[in-house]
Amino acid sequence: MMNIMEINGYQAVIKYDPEIEMFRGEFIGLNGGADFYASDIDGLRREGETSLKVFLEMCKEDGVEPRKAFSGKFNLRVSPELHARLVTRATAEGKSLNKWVADLLDESIGAD
């Protein structure tokens, strides 16, 4: 089960907070924070739409791009032994380590 809700083209991670007995949504990939709470899914969607609308209005007023820009680069630390095994597998498939790992990650999360 994926705990991701899409609202107006933006994605939010959904978690249940047992302390307050409510669902919490938090938009991801934004240049700021935007979260929302509700006790049921329909309410969560309504609150998410409201939260997103307020966030986008604030971005417009401040001249800020709402979506965070990603470079496409991140560092991954693994053991030297795993690194060697990964290079072997990538080479066996005729790919660079970067391409092999990127393909593997893409396959693991599926198509959007």
Image (tube, rainbow, N blue to C red):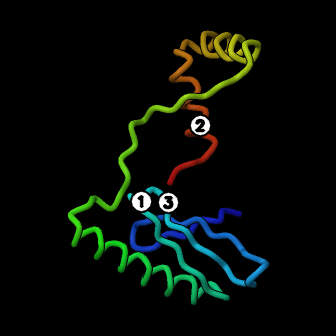
Tags 3 and 1 in contact by the CB under 8 Å rule?
Answer: yes
Left or right placement of residue 31 versus residue 90 in this view: left
Quadrant in which residue 90 is drawn:
top right
Q: Is residue 38 above or below residue 107?
A: below
- Type of residue at label 3? Ile
- Disc 1 packing (10 Å; few <14; some 14–19; many ≥20): some
Q: How far is the residue under mark 3 from the one under mark 1?
A: 6 Å
Q: Nearer the viewer, residue 33 or 101?
A: 33
Residue ID for mark 1: 30
Question: In the structure shown, which secondary structural element does the residue marked by tag 1 occupy?
Answer: loop
Query: Foreground: 84 or 27?
Result: 27
Query: What whole-number distance in Å separates the C-alpha atoms at marks 1 and 2?
Result: 22 Å
Determine which of the numbered discs, if any, sits on residue 105 in the image. 2
Residue drawn at the location 58% of the way across and 73% of the way down: 25
Rendered residue at 59%/82% (across/down): 37
Query: Badge 2 local density, few (<14 within 10 Å), some, or many (20+)?
Result: few
How many numbered circles does the render carry? Answer: 3
Mark sitting earlier along the chain (1/2): 1
Where residue 19 appears, x then y in whole percent?
A: 78, 79
